[in-house]
């Protein structure tokens, strides 16, 4: 099978699994998850074959695997869609395929372990097998087979299809279709436990917030098409003449070129999808969904798609740049990315929910990638996107394992505590050793533990790029964010696994089954080894022992391979010091925390602590300036004034006028004219009938006399006519 054909097939198994589960196997839990995992495996296998062929193709950057077909007829020609795998696409396929497969496998254990009769995953809903009475008083029995189990695997299969479609697309239109499919799936899966009001609110919040960015992205796509007549990546991003024309053409905004305005509009789509400031508020609430969904959103699909998109269109974002200077879109990305990285890291240090800490960590790390791309670090941004996917998937799945272990303790003791609150944990390293060691590896990778973890190498390259290109403000901001990252990561590890148990539930926690721990072990391997492919040649002592394969491979995506920055000890020592210093400080502050004690930061930070704990009150601010006015407009202005007074008033006026006109027509036209004409015809007919009825006597002799007389009269008439014609 040709590589191009194989690429076409990569997204199809999850889509087929989605339809089969929805239409046929939704009553069978075993068949449903078997279909989903089998589909994920087939896509993984095809992706690995394509990746290996891509690695063995020396000229892949210049001659990628691509294939297209005519799809939409236009006035002149066709709009074609197709598939494309270049070095960037191949590297993205690698981490997407691995993380998706591991999350699917983990999901089986997650939904089948530690759930008494499968009911605790249905908060607010009746137990399976129970009899419930509907609104009409009719009894119904809840199915004994959990329909939401199959629904879950159907939805994450569609989620996977959306991401695969986005990665292999050769144009912005089909990329946007995959983008929107993932938006729909995030809505369905964040609110998967729709019996919880908080889950319903979170799904709406995520959908509406990301739609804001998507509207601007769609405008950017439309503007790009109007300027170029195509949306194909190769035709736009790897065509110097097109890029130069876009960078030279003025836009609708004075001072911005068409390329700059298009780049900004498309980047706003990433701000929404990848939860960058100020559209970051939806991602922490996405923790309301099942933990595998959190891992899918934060590592394998949703937010990775936003960063992948801006990496993909980097030639457009940098169009018009001369001698390393930043374009307007790049400057915007550097400022927003670095600011978001530090902003989210400060919030994470004050969160106690184990998944919410990781959520703000994701926002911060995505800010790293955006900032890296903003300063021109194309390879560094791609490198961190890859390593982050592995260790963040590991951390989220590890947090799900911890929560399940704590839930077992809650069920054993009967204590009513929050199994996701780290203040109720402690000492889990002895109860859950596999989860502990894998979580420790993922946490150290996130913190950037020197030399050992993948996160160190990718984060160090971002700091080196920011420093090497003299963007010192970005460098200092990211260094502070890295220090806080190491601190809150070690805080999380210490509160969860080290010390003594701070609740009876933690004392009775237990390790999760192999379907949950095997994916953790696999991802832990990548959380360490994924960094080896990007060790810079200039790195002291070990640089050059392994080739910097990632830089050579991924940089081949661009028309001109970017040059690496010159070696400097400052970013290297900064990267090492902030990682080790943050880890040590996090352990030092929380190593002796006892049950019932307050967070030491609460006393140390004073009035700043509640600000961080409440996320700078952005949710309250947005509720005040967006939600409440919207509610007022809909309930007061629109309903009472526009609907009740204006619209209803107009309708009532039209109704009254219609009645009056109807009455007038009835009195002056219908009755005298229409009815009068009908009555007159009827009366004439009746009078004629009464006048002529006298000839109807029923006597045959009279009828014969009348016939003879009629015949004589008619004969006379005809004779007269004939005579007249003869005379003429």
Image: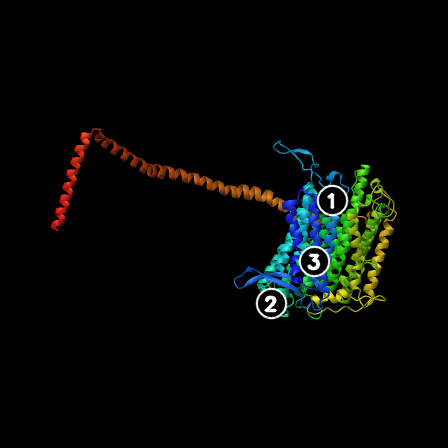
Q: Quadrant of residue 68?
A: bottom right
Judged by depth in the image, the label closer to the viewer, 1 or 3, is 3
Reading the image, the residue beneath label 2 is: 249
Is the Cβ of the residue at disc 1 closer than 8 Å to that at disc 3?
Answer: no
In three-dimensional space, the C-alpha distance between marks 1 and 2, rounded to whole angstroms, equals 55 Å
Reading the image, the residue beneath label 3 is: 46
Residue 719 screen position, x and y as percent? 13, 44
Residue 429 screen position, x and y as percent? 85, 48
Judged by depth in the image, the label closer to the viewer, 1 or 2, is 1
Residue 133 screen position, x and y as percent? 65, 32
Q: Quadrant of residue 508?
A: top right
SS for callout 1: helix
In three-dimensional space, the C-alpha distance between marks 2 and 3, rounded to whole angstroms, equals 42 Å
Residue 338: in sight, yes or no? no
Q: Which callout, 2 or 3, points at the residue further toward the start of the chain?
A: 3
SS for callout 3: helix
In depth, the one of 515 and 398 nearer the eye is 515
Instruction: Tell me the number on the disc at residue 111.
Output: 1
In depth, the one of 451 and 42 nearer the eye is 42
Q: Quadrant of residue 258?
A: bottom right
SS for callout 2: loop
Instruction: Tell me the number on the disc at residue 45.
Output: none
Q: How many marks?
A: 3
How crowded pointer 3 is (Cα within 10 Å; few <14, some 14-19, many 20+) is rated as some
Give the residue displayed 80% in from the left and 43% down from the top: 406
Q: Which callout, 1 or 3, points at the residue further toward the start of the chain?
A: 3
**Relative to 611, does residue 115 appear above or below in the rendering?**
above
How crowded pointer 2 is (Cα within 10 Å; few <14, some 14-19, many 20+) is rated as some
**Relative to 709, does residue 543 appear above or below in the rendering?**
below
Relative to 595, is 156 on the left or the right? left
In three-dimensional space, the C-alpha distance between marks 1 and 3, rounded to whole angstroms, equals 27 Å
Q: Quadrant of the N terminus?
A: bottom right
């Amino acid at each position: 099978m040709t590589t191009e054909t194989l690429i076409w097939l990569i997204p199809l198994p999850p889509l087929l699994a989605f339809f089969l589960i929805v239409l046929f196997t939704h009553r069978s839990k075993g068949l449903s998850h078997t279909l989903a995992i089998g589909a994920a495996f087939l896509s993984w296998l095809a992706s690995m074959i394509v990746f290996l062929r891509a690695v063995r193709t020396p000229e892949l950057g210049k001659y990628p695997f691509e294939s297209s077909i005519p799809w939409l007829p236009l006035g002149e020609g066709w709009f074609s869609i197709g598939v494309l795998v270049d070095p960037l696409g191949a590297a993205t396929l690698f981490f997407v395929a691995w993380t998706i497969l591991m999350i699917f496998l983990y999901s089986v254990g997650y939904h089948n372990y530690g759930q008494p009769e499968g009911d605790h995953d249905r908060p607010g809903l009746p137990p399976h097998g129970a009899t419930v009475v509907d609104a009409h008083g009719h009894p119904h029995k809840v199915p004994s087979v959990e329909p939401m189990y199959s629904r879950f695997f159907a939805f994450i299969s569609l989620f996977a299809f959306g991401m695969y479609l986005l990665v292999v697309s050769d144009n912005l239109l089909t990329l946007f279709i995959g983008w929107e499919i993932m938006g729909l799936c995030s809505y369905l899966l964040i609110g998967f436990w729709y019996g919880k009001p908080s889950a319903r609110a979170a799904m709406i919040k995520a959908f509406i917030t990301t739609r804001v960015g998507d509207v601007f992205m769609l405008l950017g796509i439309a503007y790009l098409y109007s300027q170029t007549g195509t949306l194909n990546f190769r035709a736009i991003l790897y065509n110097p003449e097109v890029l130069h024309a876009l960078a030279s053409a003025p836009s609708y905004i004075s001072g911005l070129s068409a390329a700059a305005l298009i780049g900004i509009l498309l980047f706003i789509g990433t701000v929404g999808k990848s939860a960058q400031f100020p559209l970051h508020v939806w991602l922490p609430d996405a923790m309301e969904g099942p933990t595998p969904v959190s891992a899918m959103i934060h590592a394998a699909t949703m937010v990775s798609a936003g960063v992948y998109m801006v990496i993909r269109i980097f030639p457009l974002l940098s169009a018009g740049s001369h001698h390393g200077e930043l374009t307007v879109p790049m400057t915007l990305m550097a400022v927003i990315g670095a600011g978001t990285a530090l902003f989210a890291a400060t919030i994470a240090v004050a969160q106690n929910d184990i998944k919410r800490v990781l959520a703000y960590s994701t926002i911060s790390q995505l800010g790293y990638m955006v900032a890296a791309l903003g300063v021109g670090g194309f390879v560094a941004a791609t490198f961190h996107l890859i390593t982050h996917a592995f260790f963040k998937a590991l951390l989220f799945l590890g947090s799900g394992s911890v929560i399940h272990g704590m839930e077992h303790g809650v069920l054993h003791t009967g204590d009513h505590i929050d199994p996701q609150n780290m203040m109720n944990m402690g000492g889990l390293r002895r109860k859950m050793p596999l989860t502990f060691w894998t979580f420790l590896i993922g946490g150290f990778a996130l913190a950037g533990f020197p030399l050992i973890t993948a996160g160190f190498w990718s984060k160090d390259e971002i700091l080196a790029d920011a420093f090497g290109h003299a963007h010192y403000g970005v460098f200092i901001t990211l260094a502070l964010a890295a220090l806080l990252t190491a601190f809150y990561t070690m805080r999380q590890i210490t509160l969860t696994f080290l010390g003594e148990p701070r609740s009876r539930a933690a004392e009775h926690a237990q390790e999760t089954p192999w379907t949950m721990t095997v994916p953790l072990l696999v991802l832990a391997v990548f959380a360490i080894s994924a960094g080896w492919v990007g060790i810079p040649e200039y790195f002291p002592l070990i640089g050059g022992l392994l080739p910097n394969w990632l830089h050579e491979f991924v940089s081949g995506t661009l028309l001109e391979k970017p040059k690496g920055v010159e070696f400097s000890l400052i970013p290297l020592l900064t990267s090492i010091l902030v990682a080790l210093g943050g880890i040590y400080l996090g352990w030092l502050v929380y190593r002796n925390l006892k049950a019932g004690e307050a967070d030491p930061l609460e006393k140390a930070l004073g009035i700043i602590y509640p600000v961080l704990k409440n996320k700078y009150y952005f949710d309250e601010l947005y509720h005040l300036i967006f939600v409440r006015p919207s509610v007022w407009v809909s309930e007061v202005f629109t309903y009472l004034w526009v609907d009740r007074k204006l619209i209803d008033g107009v309708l009532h006026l039209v109704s009254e006028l219609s009645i009056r006109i109807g009455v007038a027509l009835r009195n002056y036209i219908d009755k005298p004219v229409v009815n009068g004409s009908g009555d007159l015809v009827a009366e004439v007919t009746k009078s004629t009938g009464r006048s002529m009825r006298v000839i109807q006597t029923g006597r045959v002799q009279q009828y014969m006399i009348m016939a003879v007389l009629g015949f004589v009269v008619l004969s006379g008439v005809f004779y007269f006519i004939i005579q007249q014609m003869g005379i003429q």
